[in-house]
Every structure is written in C-alpha cells, then in structure tokens.
Image (cartoon, rainbow, N blue to C red):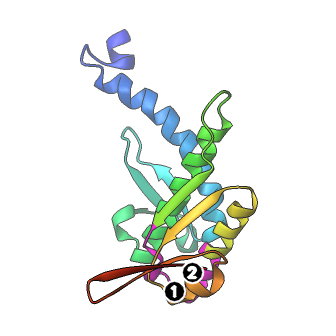
Amino acid sequence: KLNKLIGSADGAKFKVIAQSYTLNLLLLHANKHLAYLSKRYKLQQVPDTLALQVIDCDMCDEIRTVYSLSGGESFMAALSLALGMADQIKSKKGSINLDMMFIDEGFGSLDSQSLDQAIDCLIDIQQDGKLIGIISHVSELKERIDHKIILSRKNKETKIAIE
C-alpha cells in the first residue's frame, strides 16, 4: 500500500508529491501577479508532473501548453512566476528577504498595453520597498524609469552615465 501511495525506493513518485505541494503554493502567488498583468491567463500544474500549463480564460478556460504562448505572454508568465517566488520566500517565517530583483530583457516582446501593465506592476513592487534592476534596450522604459545607469559603447570604449 505504501509503495502505491509514495512510490518505490528511488523516491521519484514521492519527490513529485512533495515538490507539487511547493509548486502549487508558488502558483497561488504567481497567479495573483498574473491576474494583475493579464486577466486572460492562469497557470496551473499539469497533473502528476512538475510541468506547467496555462488556462486561457478568454477561451472558455481552455487548457493550453505554455509553449503556445507568444513571446510577450511568456514574459508575463515568467515575470509572474519570479514575483510569486519572491512572495513565497518572503511569506516563510525566518526566511531570507528578497529586496532586490534584476530583470534581463523580455520587454521588447511586449505590445504597448502589456508593457504599460508590466511597468505599472514593477512600479508598485518598487513602492513596496524592493529594488528592481531592469536591463533593456526598449526606449519606452527609459522614459518611465527615474534612476538609470546607461552604458554606451563608442570606438571600443564603454561609457557609463548615471541619471
């Protein structure tokens, strides 16, 4: 009976059970952020695996693979997971506090409305006391971010400007 419940000596089935618990907690946090960024999607665990799938709320809750998301949609889902992970770590007593986050690119794949939502979300998080570093070439971000470190390269010389 125990073998049927938690698996054999290699622990594979039990590992999925234990990690599924943590994954579902992460998805609770991530879906709060994803609802703010895009009301269209929810993330959920593929049953009996540690993989993710997407519920498309605009298509009568159709279940889709994460690979069917566009670049911008994938970025929003990944950002939601990162923010959810920070929330999950913060919610544990005696745990470390993630007060800083770096986001490398991804903004170029967003349409203007999604870009605005992502920036608004990051501004809200920043106002909660978190430091967010963004690495991007998107010019619209430069206009909306107050403090910047700008790197430029000319004739094999790198220049750094702080604004």
Vertical position of residue 16 compared to residue 97: above or below: above
Q: Specify whether residue 107 is painted magenta.
A: yes
Instruction: Quickly name the residue at label 1.
Output: 111
Identify the image quadrant of the N terminus.
top left
Q: What element does badge 1 sit on?
A: loop
Which residue is at the front of the view, 7 or 141?
A: 141
> Which image quarter: residue 39?
bottom right
Q: Residue at x 52, y 54 (%)?
A: 82
Q: Which stretch is magenta?
A: 104-118
**Gap in Å between the C-alphas at discs 2 and 1?**
6 Å
Residues tagged 2 and 1 counted as in contact (Cβ below 8 A) = yes
Numbered label attached to residue 115: 2
- Looking at the rendered structure, the kind of residue marked 2 is Leu
Q: Of helix, strand and loop, which one carries label 2?
A: helix
Which residue occupies 61% across, 80% down?
163
* Front residue of this view, candidates 76 and 151: 151
State the residue at coordinates (36%, 40%). Answer: 49
